[in-house]
Amino acid sequence: MLSASTKMLPAITVSALDFKRIESVLDALPPAYDDMRDRLFAELDRADVVEPTAVPPTLVTMNSRVRFTVLATGADMVKTLVYPKDQAANENNISILTPLGSALLGLSIGQEIEWQIDAQKTMRVRIDAIEYQPERAGDFHL
């Protein structure tokens, strides 16, 4: 669950193509996922939506391979942000439907975000690098 205060959330940008695809995924979710759907729709509602060709190369988009640091521990991680159907394909994939996946979407290198993991614990990460971004590679999956 993301932090309750949107004032503390960093600005995010989402490609129009990712926006449309994520909406389709959310619309198809069963009622058991209502909480996740609401949280991710809230993220999309606050996003600046741009055309895929206008996506900056420093932005986390769907299918981007992202290097980030868990600030509390200093742990350096690399994950690829994917749609739920692709999560099992690689242990380093992280679904957009997970709290971390939805938190990473739309962030840029250098940005940080904190979100609630459970009632007593939060996690804060910083985006360090985008090792691969489909838009930068010209791979728009049209």
Image (cartoon, rainbow, N blue to C red):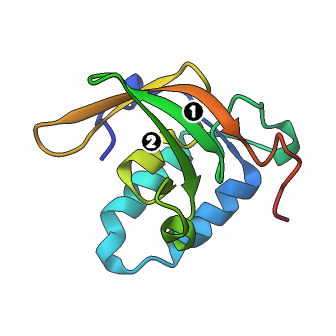
Q: Is residue 34 left or right of residue 110?
A: left
Residue furthest to the top = 110
> Which quadrant, please, contains the C terminus?
bottom right
Name the residue type under label 2.
Ala
User: Are the two marked residues, 2 and 1, in contact with CB atoms closer than 8 angstroms?
Assistant: yes
* Residue found 53% across the figure and 62% down from its top: 90
Q: How far apart are the alpha carbons under marks 2 and 1?
A: 8 Å
* Residue found 50% across the figure and 66% down from its top: 87
Q: Nearer the viewer, residue 120 or 11?
A: 120
For label 1, the residue is 107
* Residue found 65% across the figure and 33% down from its top: 130
Q: Nearer the viewer, residue 59 or 26?
A: 59
Residue furthest to the left = 120
Name the residue type under label 1.
Leu
Image coordinates of residue 57 in percent, x first then y, are 77, 31
Image coordinates of residue 14 in percent, x first then y, are 66, 43
For label 2, the residue is 103
* The image quarter in which residue 53 lies: top right
* Residue found 81% across the figure and 63% down from its top: 141
